[in-house]
Image: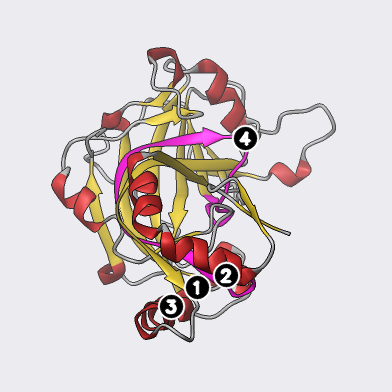
Amino acid sequence: MIRIPFLNKEFQSKTEVVTYLKQNKQQLVNLKKAKEHHTDAAKFQYTFLAEGKPVDVSKANAGTNPVPDNVDTIQVKVVMNSTNWLDSHLDVHIPGIWKKTLEQNANKGFYLLQEHNASFDKVISHQSDVQVYTEFKNWTELGVNASGQSECLIFEATIKKSVNPFMFEQYKNQYVKNHSVGMMYVHIGLAIYDENDEKEMEYWNKYRPQVINGERADELGFFWVVTEAKLREGSAVLFGSNEITPTLETTETKEEQPSNHEKPSDDISSDPPQEKKRSQNLLLI
C-alpha cells in the first residue's frame, strides 16, 4: 500500500500512482498553486555574542543560562529554505525559485513571524529589521554528507525583546529548532518516471539528477518540481518539512541594532561574494 502526501489517497502499486497522476496532473498542479505552502526545517548552529565577544555555551551548568541576562537584542542568520532537497511534501525547489519575487519586492519587507500567525502579537521581527537574500552553500555546510551546493533562502533578522518577549527568550535559550517559509507556488511541474512516455521521461531526467536525496522519489516514481514561488513571510516553527534550514548564527548585544540598511559585519559565509544575491527589506505579499 502506498500513501501519497497531499493527495490523501492510497494506492496498491507504483504503476497505479503514476497512472492516477498522469490522468489528473493539471488538476493537481492547479490545487498546489492555489494553496499556501509552508516548507520548513530543523538544524541549528548557534553562535552567541555579548558585547561583541563570543559566549561559550558549552560551559553552562544545569539550570544556568550562559547568555547574559541584560541583552535586549539578538541578531540571527537563518536558512529558511534550501533547494534540490525532496521534502516531506515530495516537493523539490529548484535554484532560481526566489529570483523573481525578490526582484519584484526589493527595498520593501518581509516579516519574521511566530508559527505563520500573521497577527500583531505574533511578529518576531518587523520588515525593517529583516534582510532576505539567496546564497549558495555547500551541502557539507548544511550538515549533509554530499558534494555540490544548494541555493539557500537566507533571513537575517534583528530580534528585539520589546517586540515579542516570549520568542526573544525562545531564541536566547536556543529552543527554536525549526524555521519555515510561507509561500505560494507560481510555476510547478510533476516529474514522473515512465519509460513508455518520452515527454515524461525527459522531464524526470532533467530534474532527478538535481535532487540530493532523491531515493524516495525513485521509490514512488514521481516528485513535484517548483521553479518559481512567491515569498510571503518567514516563521519560527516547532516542526519542519525540509530539515536543511539551520540557524547559522545568533548574535546578542545590549544595544538596539542599527537599521538593516547597514549590513551586519559578521558574515560567517565562506562563499565568494559573487555568489550572493541580496534583496533587502522585502514586501510581505
Magenta-highlighted residues: 218-247
* Position in image of residue 174 (x %, y %): 64, 36
- Residue to which mark 3 is pinned: 204
Whether residue 2 sits left or right of residue 5 in the image: it is: right
Q: Amino acid at mark 3?
A: Trp
Q: Amino acid at mark 4?
A: Leu
Mark 1 or mark 2: whose residue is earlier in sequence: 1
Camera-near label (4 vs 1) is: 1
Camera-near label (1 vs 2) is: 2
Camera-near label (4 vs 2) is: 2
User: CA–CA distance between discs 4 and 1?
Assistant: 25 Å
Does the residue at mark 1 contact the one at mark 2 (Cβ under 8 Å)? yes
Mark 3 or mark 2: whose residue is earlier in sequence: 3
* Position in image of residue 275 (x %, y %): 30, 69
Residue 53 appearing in the image = yes
Mark 4 or mark 3: whose residue is earlier in sequence: 3
Whether residue 157 sits left or right of residue 193 in the image: it is: left
Q: Amino acid at mark 1?
A: Val
Residue at x 77%, y 37% (from the top left corner): 60
**On screen, residue 16 above or below 253:** below
Residue 9 magenta: no
